[in-house]
Amino acid sequence: MPVAEGVSFDLTLVWGLLIALAVLIYVILDGFDLGLGMLFAVEPERGDRDVMMNSVAPVWDGNETWLVLGGGGLLAAFPLAYALILPALYAPIIAMLLALIFRGVAFEFRWRTDRRRWVWDLAFIGGSAVAALAQGVALGALLQGIEVDEAARAYSGGWWDWLTPFSVTVGVAVMVGYMLLGATWLVMKTTGPLQERMRARAWVLGFATVAFIGVVSLWTPFLQEGYFVRWFGGWRIGAAFGVGAAVLLIAVLMFRALTVHRHEYWPFVLALAMFALCFVGLGISIFPYIVPTEVTLWEAAAPYESQLFMIVGAGILLPLILGYTAYAYWVFRGKVDPEAGYH
């Protein structure tokens, strides 16, 4: 790859890391939001639901910024990967986008009516669940592999290739993990009986999440030969077991923070750390591929000049996005006032 004068780093790798970072931040920020929506289903009282929704009201609509950044960055920096992945995952991606739109509408409309509030509550629950399931199914379908016509460099699979037992399992795992994030978020943001119920639910959801992480991690190496080699060959075997041990350690600390020490903030922080470690494990599985195990980052990359041009804009926009996101969370830190309302 040509390197411009004065530039000593691999822009393709930098763009890969930027897109991975955008996806991770989206999962972290919108994950607890979607999990909170699914937890609506087990909290029937209107007052509790109002408090739950008010806990994310100031920040929820900014979380999708990272989804747009990840998708837009994929199109701009890795157009071949975009052209291969989108046709393979049209169904779950369209389902996710429609669910996010419907969920956003429900978020606004449930405050505008009393007679039909239950309809919009169901829409909020359904939109959250479908969006989370679709994200997990898309991830599972990508991990299991996409059929690529080597000559035409185009997707050659069928419409239903994304729907398999593995992809559905990953979809359910993401739903459970998001609900864990939502429960620990509410432990941090609420008080009284609602907080105690969420503390108890976080315990159950934590065990379920760890179990799903184990199932998916043990299943993944056998999806493709390349995964098995990367997990159990060379230095990566140590990294894989290290990540697994770290996940278990964080899970133990999270359970102790929930029950023994009864912390309010640490369960959420540790749940986020667990997701971040799973993301590291995912990177170990697929790197250096962006379309496992067909196309590498460098094969899918846009021309170097295009990457160089775009990195300037990213260098300006990313700090701004991180800044206003951090500021919003800082301004609305602390417990939710049960008497406050979202309008």
Image (tube, rainbow, N blue to C red):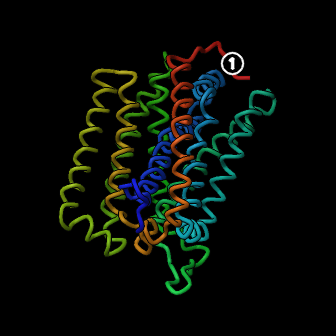
Q: Residue at x 51, y 28 (%)?
A: 326
- Front residue of 76/211: it is 76
Q: Residue at x 48, y 59 (%)?
A: 139
Is 288 positioned to the left or the right of 50 in the image? left
Q: Residue at x 44, y 44 (%)?
A: 177
Residue 49: which quarter of the image?
Answer: top right
* In the image, residue 235 above or below residue 205: below
Q: Amino acid at mark 1?
A: Gly
Q: Which residue is mark 1?
A: 341
Residue 63: which quarter of the image?
Answer: top right
Few, some or many residues within 10 Å of mark 1 (<14, 14–19, 20+): few
- Front residue of 188/262: it is 188
Q: Quadrant of the C terminus?
A: top right
Is 132 positioned to the left or the right of 230 in the image? right
Give how far across and how far down residue 324 sits, in percent.
Answer: 57, 29
Give how far across and how far down residue 59 sits, in percent.
Answer: 60, 30
